[in-house]
Amino acid sequence: MKKTAFILSLIAFSATCVTFNRDYKLGVDAEMSKNYEQAVSYYQKAALKDPNEPVYRLAFARARASASLYYLQNARVLAGQGRKEEALAAYRKAAFFDPANRMIPKEMKSLEEGPAEKAAAPELSVKGPVSLRAGGEKLNLAFRTEVSVKSIFQAIGRMAGISFVFDEQFRDTFLAVDLAGKEVEQAVGYLCAVTRNFYRVIDERSVLIAPDNVQKRQQYELNAIKTFYLSNIDAQDLQQQLIALMRSVYKAPNIQVDKTLNSLTVRDSPQVVEMVARLLRRWDKPRGEVLIEVEIMEVTRQRLQQLGLDFGLNVGDSLLKFRLNPVDSGSTDPGWFRIQGLDLTDMANYELSVPNALLQFLGSDSDTRIIAQPRFRGIGGEEIRYLVGQKVPIPQSTFTPIAAGGLNTQPIVNYTQQDVGIEINLKPRIHMEKEVTLEVDIKISSIAGTGIADIPIIATREVKNTIRLKDGETNLLAGLLRDEERQSLTGIPGLKDIPLLGRLFSSTEMVVEKTDVILTMTPHIIRPMEISEEDLKPLWLEPDSLAGVSAAGGARLEEAYPLNKGEEPGAPPAEREPGQNSVYLSPAGLEVPAGREFNLNVEISSVTEIANLSLVINFNSALLQLKDAREGGLLKQMGDNVPFLKSITGSSCTLGFSKSGTGGGFKGRGTLAVLAFSPVGRGEATVTVDSISALSSDSRSVKLGTGQARILIR
């Protein structure tokens, strides 16, 4: 009974010593062969048989992830080859093994329905608290002779229905400029640029003009404060870059970093804040991720061969030993004897020792294989480190004096821990062409023996390389070979060197050891870099001297009356509202020095065709002298045979035209005449339009409003 109980307990103990069951071993073999479906099946069976074993559950999860990745890569390859049905089947298998992967159904939907249209990016423009509202019509102003810049602004204001306020340090200059066909915003910005001024919108109908310098910028320029919350990049790393990029001639942007929220708060003009927003949208993108499959195989083969006679001698032993050992020495101490009566000629007092000899015919051949299949998932540009091995203590001795001023005689031993094993350092970089560059640093070290004082000797093989692989491409790295061969001959001196017969008095030992490491690397892009077409477009940053052209202190122009469809810029506008038939002078206000000639344009705006027109221009002859009235471009719009009528008297000028025959008259906006005045006195003069008579092409009367211009002669 006791014997039976002992046998049963021994069987139970042996059963508990079994590490893994058969299904797990079959799963390992299938996974090594990259037959992932079978591996999943075997691991699942092993986990069901022993649910409490964590190794089986981890292997099952690992095999499912490998199978999903394997079929996902196959699906992408098949989709690239145009084999849609096979690609969809591979996608379904990948989704079966990894249902939590949201990328798989997204790619399946894209393959079935085509690429989805991307949602429009949110608007990043930074608008000011007020916006300038002006008429949407193009300007039709041309100053061919130099006139006051302030009067040009006033002329634009009369046409657009806005008013301009000038800073006390504003310096008026004279300028000849053609603003025909420009919008109000373009005209104001252009004038500010060429006269070194900038403008700030005060309200919807008021604009401030000030000199463009640091003091006035700080006094009038509108600033915006906006906080940007970043998700994928460190806000602190961008602070100096943004300051360097957005620094202007007269100041640098104020950028504050919040490490807790990983945010940037920018204070500057709306134009700069908007540019920062566009830059951050291009920079704050998730970096690509890559999965690197590494397979490491270390193969070691050792061959040992021993032939001949082995006398079993150690180092320092001799082949034949003689010893003097008197038979009757009378000594009781071992190793001591009396020499009285010693007879050296008696051979009975001597001993001879002959070693044992063993005839050897031995040979051995052993193979060792170490396999590891790690998988690394990392972010592009970040280093991945893998180390398998052990830490070996290496002693380092230093000598210090026992007392101050003495000799360095006291040894102090310190130990440093050195890694011995397989160390892999990888740094992936993902390219837009779906390729991966790997910076590889492989170091394989092992203990090759011991040296002085049993200090370990470490053998090292190291490879550093940079390779570029396609998504799913495998690179094979081999040749880290160590080939070692040792041969020794032991025997009786003299006799062992005799040809042929020497083998009877010697033994030969030959050891051949070969070690090779084979390493394969396969990168798989998990998440590529998302770069849109908008990200590839350049960002245009205006020079600092033109900062007031488009920003205008943060306010933007909104057209109250946009151009009609098909209407060309600068062309006569179509009918927008009644009551626009008028004759006016441009510019409406002008300030000139005495003795300086200037021009006034007689402008006509009509929504009704006019075939015949006559009007009278009146002015103060004591202050102004009309030298000439030149034909404008209005008559050329009606043909080449329309006569231009003019008659100049002392204080008035009669202008007109008459179109004979059939056909339409003039309709729209144009310049009838250019009046060339010369100041003859000082003061304020008024030029008016009176006595207008206009007939349409069907001989009906056309009513036209009139305007006037005020001239200040300094």
Image (cartoon, rainbow, N blue to C red):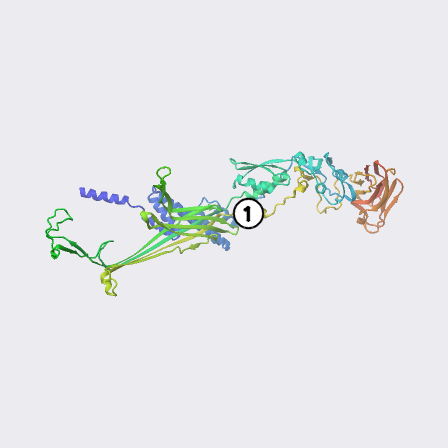
Instruction: Name the residue: 54% across, 49% down.
Output: 115
Residues 569 and 392: in front is: 392
Mark 1 Cα shell of 10 Å, populated few (<14), some (14-19), many (≥20): few
Q: Is residue 300 left or right of residue 288?
A: left
**Quarter of the view holding residue 356:** bottom left
**Image quadrant containing the C terminus:** top right
**Quarter of the view holding residue 585:** top right
**Quarter of the view holding residue 229:** top right
Instruction: Name the residue: 87% across, 45% down.
Output: 646
Residue 15: x, y in percent? 27, 45
Q: Is residue 134 left or right of residue 604?
A: left
In this view, the residue farthest toward the front is 340
The answer, for residue 240, to whether it is visible in the render is yes
Q: Is residue 301 above or below residue 196?
A: below
The answer, for residue 93, to whether it is visible in the render is no
Residues 44 and 26: in front is: 26
Disc 1 is placed on an element classified as loop
Residue 181: x, y in percent? 73, 45
Q: Is residue 117 above or below residue 319?
A: above
Residue 246: x, y in percent? 60, 41
Q: Is residue 671 left or right of residue 44?
A: right
Residue 273: x, y in percent? 61, 39
Q: Which residue is mark 1?
A: 531
Q: How many marks?
A: 1
Three-letter residue code for mark 1:
Ile
